[in-house]
Image (cartoon, grey):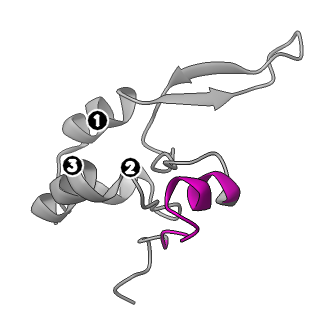
Amino acid sequence: IRRGHQVYQQVCASCHSMSLVSYRDLVGVAYTEEETKAMAAEIEVVDGPNDEGEMFTRPGKLSDRFPQPYANEQAARFANGGAYPPDLSLITK
């Protein structure tokens, strides 16, 4: 699992999403809790709104899902010549 995650991060994540996978899914399977928390903290997550109604960014945490490479399907298709890269969350099921 660890090697698969490394390949995904280095090769696949630039086009493919894993929208149903949270960082906590890697704890105990591929990484320790500390390693996974550090990995999640490397991403910026849009959260909110705060008390003033503004959205803000925060470091990722274990319950956050992997970030999507594109803002929406149209952006993904535009970047890939009209093809929509499949989500890899359930590719083996």
In the rendered structure, does residue 62 fall within the stretch colored magenta?
Answer: no
Q: In this rendering, does residue 43 appear at all?
A: yes
Which residue is found at the position 17% from the left and 65% from the top? 4
Extreme residue in the bottom direction: 93
Q: Are marks 3 and 2 in contact (CB under 8 Å)?
A: no
Q: Determine whether the residue tagged by mark 3 lies in a helix, strand or loop.
A: helix
Residue at which label 3 appears: 10
User: Which residue type does callout 3 highlight?
Assistant: Gln
Direction from residue 83 to residue 75 in the image, left or right = right
Residue at which label 2 appears: 23
Closer to us: 91 or 28: 91
User: Which residue type does callout 2 highlight?
Assistant: Tyr
Q: How far apart are marks 3 and 2 (CA)?
A: 16 Å
In the rendered structure, does residue 83 fall within the stretch colored magenta?
Answer: yes
Q: Determine whether the residue tagged by mark 1 lies in a helix, strand or loop.
A: helix
Q: How far apart are marks 1 and 3 (CA)?
A: 14 Å
